[in-house]
Amino acid sequence: MEYQLSLIKPTAALKDEYLSFYNEWVESKESMVPWVIKKDPSNFDAMVQFLNDNEQGRNLPEGWVPDSTFWLINQDKRILGVVNIRHQLTEFLLNSGGHIGYGIRPSERRKGYATKLLSLSLEKAKELGISKALVVCNEDNTGSFKTIINNGGIPDSDFIEDDGNIIKRFWIEQ
């Protein structure tokens, strides 16, 4: 299956499409992954500015690292997924966040988009100087587990969160 997919930086030009993406997540009542899609888009320009500031390392909360957010779009400019790439790892990110967090909108899952999204994300990570990326998923997230393995993920030790949730940790060298 060949896709015309690309990663783009968040842009006000796709506001209506992003709101459709966001509202689909809200209606699904699923946990929003990556964390950046939890950001309230009601002031859209401010949300895009927040994401740009994060990438430049401006106005970051204490202990945070710069991160880059990209939207996965198809040839029709439909937003299929979002990825957030952390430029460095803190202790928290080393244990349970990783370099790359990504999510596919609920109606577009099981179509191979996550595998392509992670592949494109690894290229962006390499451009940021990340030659060995940590990617994690919850133990019960079979889809993400397969996506990481399909992109060359090498298992590392698991991390058990305080609530008992098991985080599977993988390294992908490029």
Image (spheres, grey):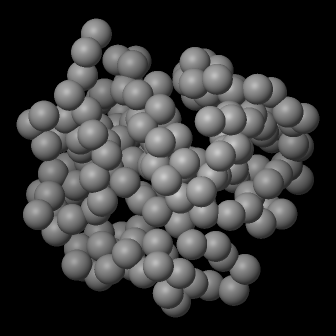
**Quadrant in the rendering for residue 14:** bottom left
* Whole-percent x, y for residue 107 in the image: 30, 29
Q: Residue at x 27, y 40 (%)?
A: 6
Task: Please state which of residues 53 and 106 is positioned toward the viewer in this rendering.
Answer: 53
Viewed as shown, does residue 76 lie left or right of 101? Answer: left
Residue 21 position (above or below residue 153): below
Viewed as shown, does residue 77 lie left or right of 119? Answer: left
Q: How many marks?
A: 0
* Whole-percent x, y for residue 53 in the image: 42, 81
**Quadrant in the rendering for residue 72:** top left
* Whole-percent x, y for residue 8 in the image: 28, 52
Residue 145 position (above or below residue 96): above
Q: Residue at x 16, y 68 (%)?
A: 12
Asked whether residue 27 appears in the rendered view, the answer is no
Q: Residue at x 36, y 33 (%)?
A: 106
Which quadrant, please, contains the N terminus? top left
Asked whether residue 173 appears in the rendered view, the answer is yes
Viewed as shown, does residue 99 lie left or right of 128? Answer: right
Residue 38 position (above or below residue 174): below
The residue sitting at the top extreme is 1
* Whole-percent x, y for residue 76 in the image: 9, 37
Which quadrant, please, contains the C terminus? top right
The residue sitting at the bottom extreme is 59
Task: Please state which of residues 76 and 23 is positioned toward the viewer in this rendering.
Answer: 76
Viewed as shown, does residue 65 lie left or right of 114? Answer: right
